[in-house]
Image (spheres, rainbow, N blue to C red):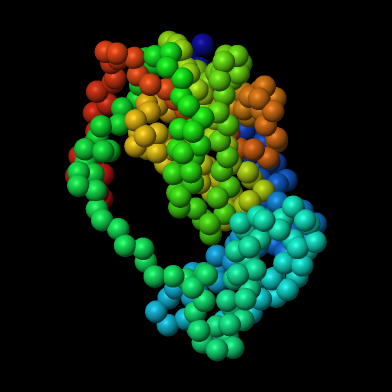
């Protein structure tokens, strides 16, 4: 068999396999993404997503130098339809997104009636000071593959999540979740990721996922991966700020492998598996890759 024929067969196999993966991605997105208010009226997660989309539109609109007045007719209509639905569910009463929607509804009416901006939805920029040495902070983070047996306290895990939760998100939907696996759970989950061989122990294995139900329409078909990547990076730097070491483990896998992980650790079909992160404290004398970096000239176009 000639080289050209072999190459053509390889390309055909690659193209066919890729088409199957794209088809499965398409199926998952179209099955779980929402298409507007009608979906929100029958699906609770879509209800959260639509109200979050609308309350953040109000917040954004009232931060401009010269907001239109009146504005937000479509948001007001959505609030009229959806806030009572959310209120009827007792478990939503304390949800941050429900309270934010109620505040935005009242703030929108106040702005359109009186021209006053409600500080519950738009407030003055909080004062801050730049880090004394930001380069040192970012340059000092390294991917560690040699961890000690020192446990990572639950309080540290929670604190890192709280910090990372401030990551930017499209219309503030914050669709991410993270599960921290330990002990036997780590052994069960790590078989679905090829880049962790030789890392032993992994004190904590973080699995970052994103809820596909939080996205809307054709334009957001790839947004889940963007959101999850932003959160994953924020989580790594949150651990770095707390003195905890990490190594990001990519989950660029087929749908079959991702489904295996979902089954293993109890994820739902709507959970997009974004990345794994090994978390722990480096052992004494641990080595880290040099990981040469592009300079500004190689990044800034």
On the image, the x and y values in percent for residue 41 come to 78, 61
- The residue nearer to you, when weighing 110 against 270, is 110
Q: Is residue 38 visible?
A: no
> Against 239, is 100 above or below?
below
Q: Kindly tell me whether residue 129 is visible in this rendering.
A: yes
Q: Residue at x 67, y 48 (%)?
A: 213
- Residue 197 locus on image (x, y percent): 46, 12
Viewer-proximal residue among 217 and 236:
236
Q: Residue furthest bottom?
A: 114
The answer to whether residue 58 is left or right of residue 229 is: right
Picture quadrant of residue 288: top left
Q: Is residue 62 above or below residue 139?
A: below
Q: Position of residue 285 (x, y in %)?
A: 26, 13
Q: Is residue 27 above or below residue 8?
A: below
Residue in the image at 39% along x and 14% along y = 148
Q: What number of labels is visible?
A: 0
| Residue 120 percent coordinates (x, y) | 52, 70
Image point (38%, 21%), residue name? 281
Q: Please name the residue shown 35% across and 19% down the image.
A: 282
- Residue 252, compared with residue 79, is above or below; it is above
* Foreground of the two, 116 or 28: 116
């Amino acid at each position: 068999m000639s080289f050209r024929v072999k190459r053509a067969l390889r390309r055909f196999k690659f193209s066919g396999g890729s088409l199957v993966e794209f088809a499965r991605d398409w199926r998952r997105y179209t099955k779980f993404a929402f298409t507007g208010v009608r979906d929100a009226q029958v699906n609770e997660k879509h209800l959260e997503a639509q109200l979050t989309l609308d309350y953040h539109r109000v917040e954004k609109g009232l931060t401009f130098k010269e907001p239109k007045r009146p504005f937000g007719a479509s948001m007001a209509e959505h609030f009229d339809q959806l806030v009572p639905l959310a209120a009827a569910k007792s478990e939503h009463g304390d949800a941050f997104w429900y309270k934010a929607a109620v505040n935005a509804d009242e703030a929108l009416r106040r702005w359109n009636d009186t021209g006053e901006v409600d500080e519950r939805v738009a407030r003055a920029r909080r004062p801050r000071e730049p880090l004394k040495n930001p380069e040192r902070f970012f340059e000092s983070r390294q991917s560690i593959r040699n961890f000690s047996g020192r446990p990572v306290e639950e309080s540290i895990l929670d604190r890192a999540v709280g910090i990372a939760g401030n990551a930017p998100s499209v219309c503030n939907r914050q669709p991410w979740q993270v599960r921290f696996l330990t002990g036997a759970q780590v052994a069960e989950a790590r078989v679905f990721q090829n880049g962790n061989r030789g890392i032993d122990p992994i004190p904590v294995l973080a699995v970052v996922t994103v809820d596909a139900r939080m996205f809307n329409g054709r334009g957001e078909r790839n947004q889940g991966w963007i959101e999850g990547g932003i959160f994953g990076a924020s989580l790594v730097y949150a651990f770095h700020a707390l003195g905890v070491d990490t190594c990001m483990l990519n989950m660029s896998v087929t749908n079959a492998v991702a489904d295996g992980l979902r089954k293993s650790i109890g994820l739902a079909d709507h959970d997009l598996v974004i990345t794994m992160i090994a978390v722990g404290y480096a052992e004494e004398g641990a080595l880290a890759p040099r990981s040469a970096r592009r300079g500004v000239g190689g990044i800034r176009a």
